[in-house]
Image: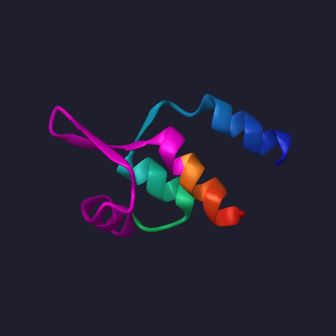
Amino acid sequence: MTSTTTSVRSTLPALLSVPRAAELLGISRASAYRYAASGELPIRRLGGRVYVITARLLAMVDGAAA
């Protein structure tokens, strides 16, 4: 992992908006919302909004890369 990747990861908030998670994953917003609805993205609902749990998302990405 490069220092840029490490610094980006260290500055991410605990919860990401679905559009921000989509941007980081390189997928469309529609796809991200579809994955969230199907349970493929780790989400938390707060106040009627949907957020992606950053730590679990990064663990999924790291597991897929291995």
Residue farthest toward the left in the current orientation of the protein: 48
51, above or below 18, in the image: above
User: Does the segment drawn in magenta span residue 33?
Assistant: yes
Left/right placement of residue 53 relative to residue 39 reads right
| Quadrant in the picture for residue 41 | bottom left
Q: Residue at x 38, y 63 (%)?
A: 40
Where residue 55 appears, x then y in whole percent?
A: 52, 39
Left/right placement of residue 7 relative to residue 2 reads left
42, above or below 16, in the image: below
Where residue 49 appears, x then y in whole percent?
A: 22, 40
Left/right placement of residue 2 relative to residue 10 reads right
| Quadrant in the picture for residue 32 | bottom left
Q: In front: 12, or 62?
A: 62
Left/right placement of residue 14 relative to residue 29 reads right
Q: Residue at x 25, y 61 (%)?
A: 37
Residue range in magenta is: 30-57
61, above or below 2, in the image: below
Q: In front: 31, or 35?
A: 35
| Quadrant in the picture for residue 35 | bottom left
Where residue 42 appears, x then y in whole percent?
A: 38, 50
Label total for image: 0
Q: Residue at x 51, y 56 (%)?
A: 23
47, above or below 29, in the image: above
- The figure's colour scheme reads rainbow
Q: Residue at x 72, y 63 (%)?
A: 66
User: Does the segment drawn in magenta span residue 14?
Assistant: no
